[in-house]
């Protein structure tokens, strides 16, 4: 065997999971072709998560493939973002699995920034900055800075190590060493978006498992993703629904196999949160009260999740 017969190992597998986003997917695919390639080998795995629109045809068109980069398209029929991500990790051949969503535009230096920290620090996982990009129209007046995180905005500042459960990475921009999954498990299929159901949490739950198990997580501020926000997300109802479904999921999980009767303190929390939200709305107007309303509807969902499981 000669030196030329030995194939260089793949450092990064970029995993793109998509479901029925044929209207937004072409821009993301085109943006992948604009990336500055890292010095080490990388590949792309696209998981079509049971799409019923024009997505399969878009993915079959190889014109978007970056030159010299291996691209594989696979289909996962089990609906749910966690199922799609679990399929990606089982398909990946890279040392690190790097996730990007189908409504995002990575900065051209996105891959290069991750590669630098992978080779410099050898972390078990990495997370990067997410900026919010309003595609159509202006930012609504009620969309306060504290609410941008619910649209994916994330910035932990300068490069550092993350170990606090309260400072996670987000699902639209993070990487994990592939062999970690065999030690702490895959993504929880009960969490995450499922079709049109607006929910999440699989990314932060996985992050907390990582840090609880003592794995190292590196924050990479130069690995920037721009999350393109649709107009239909710029509604108060979107934020309220997101928190209600989060409460549903967490209430159901907390109850476990216990009684269907929720603890009395939950009703007190709901009453207090509702009172604060109403008082703030009457005093300052609805443009200033959304965050408190989200707290209240979270407890409503939590109680409903506990009862119905």
Image (cartoon, rainbow, N blue to C red):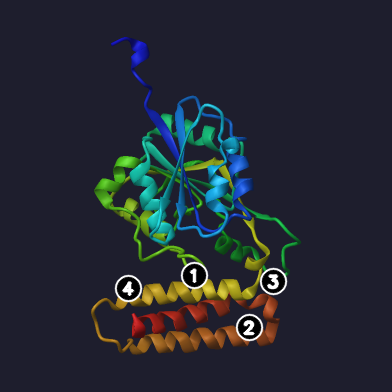
Identify the mark nearer the N-term, 2 or 1: 1
**Viewer-side label of 1, 3:** 1
- Where residue 118 appears, as percent x and y from the top left, is 42, 34
Query: At 36% from the left edge and 52% from the top edge, which residue is drawn?
Result: 86
Identify the mark nearer the N-term, 3 or 4.
3
Q: How many marks?
A: 4
Q: Measure the alpha-carbon separation of dots 2 and 1.
A: 29 Å
Tell me, for residue 263, which label it has, or none. Answer: none
Of badges 2 and 3, the one in the foreground is 3
| Horizontal side of residue 285 vs 60, given as left or right | right
**Residue mark closest to the camera, 4 vs 2:** 4
Q: Position of residue 21 (x, y in %)?
A: 57, 57
Which residue in the protein does label 2 denote?
A: 280
Return the residue at label 1.
197
- Of residue 232 and residue 125, the one placed in the foreground of this image is 232
User: Does the rendering let one see residue 157?
Assistant: no
Mark 1: secondary structure: loop
Residue 123, quarter of the rendered image: top left
Residue 107 position within the rendered picture, expressed as x and y whole percent measured from the top left = 61, 40
Image quarter of the N terminus = top left
The first of marks 4 and 2 along the sequence is 4
Q: Is disc 1 surrounded by few (<14), some (14 to 19) or many (20+) residues within 10 Å?
A: few
Find the distance from the CA under tag 2 to the CA under tag 3: 14 Å
Among numbered discs 2 and 3, the one appearing first in the sequence:
3
Q: Earlier in the sequence, mark 1 or mark 4?
A: 1
Q: Which residue is mark 3?
A: 142
Sequence-first disc among 1 and 3: 3
Q: Which residue is located at x 45 percent, y 65 percent?
A: 194
Q: Which one is nearer the viewer's eye here, 24 or 299? A: 24
């Amino acid at each position: 065997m000669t030196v030329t017969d030995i194939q260089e190992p793949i450092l990064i597998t970029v995993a793109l999971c998509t479901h029925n986003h044929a209207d937004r997917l072409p821009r993301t695919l085109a943006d992948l072709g604009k990336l500055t390639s890292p010095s080490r080998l990388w590949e792309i795995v696209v998981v079509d998560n049971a799409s019923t629109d024009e997505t399969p045809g878009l993915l079959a068109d190889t014109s978007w493939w970056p030159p010299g980069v291996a691209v594989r398209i696979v289909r996962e029929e089990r609906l749910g973002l966690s199922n799609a991500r679990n399929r990606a990790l089982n398909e990946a051949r890279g040392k690190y699995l790097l996730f990007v969503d189908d409504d995002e535009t990575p900065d051209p230096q996105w891959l290069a920034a991750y590669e630098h920290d992978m080779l410099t620090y050898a972390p078990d996982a990495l997370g990067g900055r997410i900026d919010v990009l309003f595609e159509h129209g202006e930012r609504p007046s009620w969309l306060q800075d504290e609410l941008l995180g619910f649209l994916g905005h994330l910035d932990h500042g300068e490069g550092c190590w993350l170990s606090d459960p309260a400072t996670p990475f987000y699902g639209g921009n993070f990487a994990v060493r592939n062999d970690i999954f065999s030690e702490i498990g895959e993504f929880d299929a009960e969490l995450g978006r499922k079709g049109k159901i607006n929910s999440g949490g699989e990314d932060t739950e996985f992050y907390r498992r990582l840090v609880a198990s003592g794995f190292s997580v590196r924050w990479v501020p130069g690995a920037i993703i721009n999350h393109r926000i649709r107009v239909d997300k710029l509604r108060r109802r979107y934020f309220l629904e997101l928190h209600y479904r989060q409460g549903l999921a967490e209430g159901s999980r907390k109850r476990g196999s216990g009684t269907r009767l929720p603890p009395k303190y939950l009703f007190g929390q709901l009453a207090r949160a509702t009172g604060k939200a109403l008082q703030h709305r009457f005093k300052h107007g609805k443009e200033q009260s959304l965050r408190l309303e989200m707290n209240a509807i979270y407890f409503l969902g939590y109680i409903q999740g506990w009862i119905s499981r």
